[in-house]
Amino acid sequence: MENELRVTFGGGKKVDVHYKGFIIHTDQPLYQGGEGEAPAPFDLFLASIASCAGFYVLSFLSSRGIPEEKARVSMRTIKNKEKKVIEKILIDIELPSDFPSKYQEAIIRAVDTCPVKAHILNPPSFEIKTKIGD
């Protein structure tokens, strides 16, 4: 199955992605010559990991009738300063005090099935080519 994402340019350092009827706006931060009016593409990459984890927490809680109001997911990254890449992602699942202890390992396993993480661990191949004119 093939999905197509179309990219358009919104002026300055802005790049927009059109996908499934949505437009995802991006911009670069001020220090990289952008206007900082939207998340940078790398910010969306990180947000996709965090939101995927959040979705699996929400699904886990919902399927067991556990209210999600007091639950929260936070994510931090540790960067390798020499290589200038993230070397570790820390995901914390904050649960209410009355969360059943029998589910603690199960909710971690649920979050561990996030397909965004699976694609990072088993990355797709990339094929990049040019096309001149129509």
Image: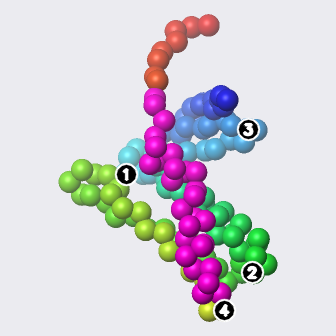
Kindly give the residue lying farthest to the left in the view shown: 82
- Depth check: give the residue in front, 61 or 70: 61
Q: Which residue is the site of mark 1? A: 31
**Disc 3 to disc 2, C-alpha distance:** 32 Å
**Disc 3 to disc 1, C-alpha distance:** 31 Å
Q: Residue at x 66, y 63 (%)?
A: 55
Mark earlier in primary sequence (4, 1) = 1
Which element is circle 3 on? loop
Segment tinted magenta in the rendering: 100-126
Magenta segment, prevailing SS (helix, strand or loop): helix
Figure quadrant of the N terminus = top right
Residue 130 percent location from the top left of the image: 48, 15
Mark 4 residue type: Asp
**Disc 1 to disc 2, C-alpha distance:** 43 Å
Q: Which mark is residue 98?
A: 4
Mark 1 residue type: Tyr
Mark 3 residue type: Lys
Q: Which mark is residue 66?
A: 2
Residue 31 percent location from the top left of the image: 37, 51
Do the residues under discs 4 and 3 have CB atoms within 8 angstroms?
no
Residue 67 percent location from the top left of the image: 75, 81
Q: Residue at x 62, y 37 (%)?
A: 17
Residue 121 percent location from the top left of the image: 44, 48
Q: Residue at x 53, y 57 (%)?
A: 49
Q: Which residue is the site of mark 3? A: 20
Q: How many marks?
A: 4
- Depth check: give the residue in front, 56 or 41: 56
Mark earlier in primary sequence (3, 1) = 3
Kindly give the residue lying farthest to the front in the view shown: 102
